[in-house]
Image (cartoon, rainbow, N blue to C red):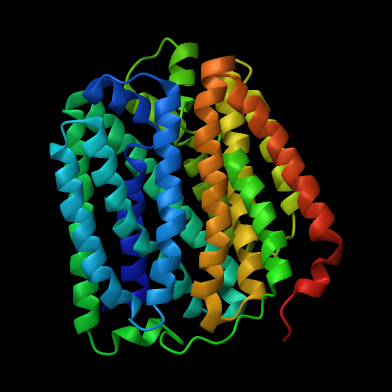
Amino acid sequence: MAISVKHWLIGITIAAVVSDSMLLPFYPHFFASVFGITDPGHIGLYLSACCLTIVLAFPMWARASRWISVLKLLIPTQLAAGVLSILCYWAETPMSFWILSLLMLVFKGSYLLVYPMIMAAERRDNHGNTIGLLSVVVHIGGIAGAVLGGVVLQWFEPRQVFLVMAVSDFLQTGVCLYLTRRPDPGSAERHDSTPEKSRVTSAVIYRLGLVMFLFYFSAYLTRPFFVRYWESVTRSGGEALSGLVFAIPAGIAILALCLSFHRGHTRSPGDGLLAAMMLGGVGLALQGLNQEWLILSGRCLFGWALFQSTVQLDQLLFALSHPGAYAADFSKINIFQQLGVLAAASSAGGLVGLLGLQMPFVVAAVGLVLTAALYGLLFHHSRHRLQPST
């Protein structure tokens, strides 16, 4: 049986996420071993620049997708990303690495268009399951990327991570080229060239975007220095093991998806979101208590809450939007998400430098509680009015 376009697109997403996740837990290690840079502020600034690059680049690709099919657009962009990944391998100075890697992200970020493309091909009553599946795909890619990145850094030359990234980009290019040559490859791209006007008002976008910003800030604040924190607490060494601990939330997300499919029903948008955010805050607080078993327990709680929260927030967006406007609306919300990640990356270095490795967990836990309060204030009591009309 031929593989469907949807499953090929999921494969592209996995390859992209694995590539993006390889260095995410290990940027402090990478900069220290390759360029001799150990300043947390420098690392935080670099991660902020990465987020800002995606914020500026993705709306451009979303606008371009109005006139060029997503698959045809991804062929040159992912090819360029692969070439720039190879050039990052040869970068000899921090400045040249910054320029090449950020330019690489400009092109690499175009793969985010695959998400609204898949959602536009799905029935609205199946959105919850599809969002959950794609969320788990991202988490699986995060696990594989963290472990693969740890293996490369532990047993190979750190720069070789970018050669693996290049292979991923070239594979994505090949898949997109293959799909464009298949009969009617655009069947999964509804309303690609003639997008309809969004049904999401600017006021709702700003409200949902504000919630997304605070949520992503809180969820990502502990990531840049989690491995350093774990290694400061435990005597168990090795980047590969650290990568596995970093990826625990991803494993919990897979378990959560399996249980969701076993129950056989999909929650309505926003259902259980308040409880999930509060549970996530507890998980983050436990991780900051400087004990191995509390960190592991907190990672599990946080992983469960993170999966439930991200699925519900994305489901709320697509419930408010229309298939023809998914790419445009998703690009708007993505700006708030990336700004949250950017703020987290820029704040993490300063918090660690001034107050130590535990402080990001405290701030992140408080941030998730505030996110829950903000969502309750802006959406929870009027959620029934935000459901799509049938």
Look at the picture and state if 35 lies above or below 299: above
Q: Residue at x 23, y 47 (%)?
A: 165
Q: Residue at x 34, y 47 (%)?
A: 20
Residue 364 location in percent, x, y? Answer: 64, 33
- Residue 58 visible in image: yes
Q: How many marks?
A: 0
**To which quarter of the image does residue 25 belong?**
top left
Look at the picture and state if 7 lies above or below 108: below
Q: Residue at x 85, y 66 (%)?
A: 382
Look at the picture and state if 101 lies above or below 261: above
Which quadrant: the N terminus?
bottom left
Residue 10 location in percent, x, y? Answer: 37, 65
Residue 68 location in percent, x, y? Answer: 33, 81
Relative to the observer, which residue lies in front, 268 or 191?
Answer: 191
Residue 158 location in percent, x, y? Answer: 21, 30
- Residue 283 visible in image: no
Q: Residue at x 49, y 19 (%)?
A: 229
Q: Looking at this rendering, what residue extends furthest in the front direction?
A: 95
Relative to the observer, which residue lies in front, 377 or 188?
Answer: 377
Q: Looking at this rendering, what residue extends furthest in the left direction?
A: 90
Which quadrant: the C terminus?
bottom right
Relative to the observer, which residue lies in front, 240 or 317?
Answer: 317
Q: Looking at this rendering, what residue extends furthest in the top direction?
A: 235
Residue 128 as seen in the image, left or right of residue 83? right
**To which quarter of the image does residue 200 belong?**
bottom right
**To which quarter of the image does residue 318 belong?**
bottom right
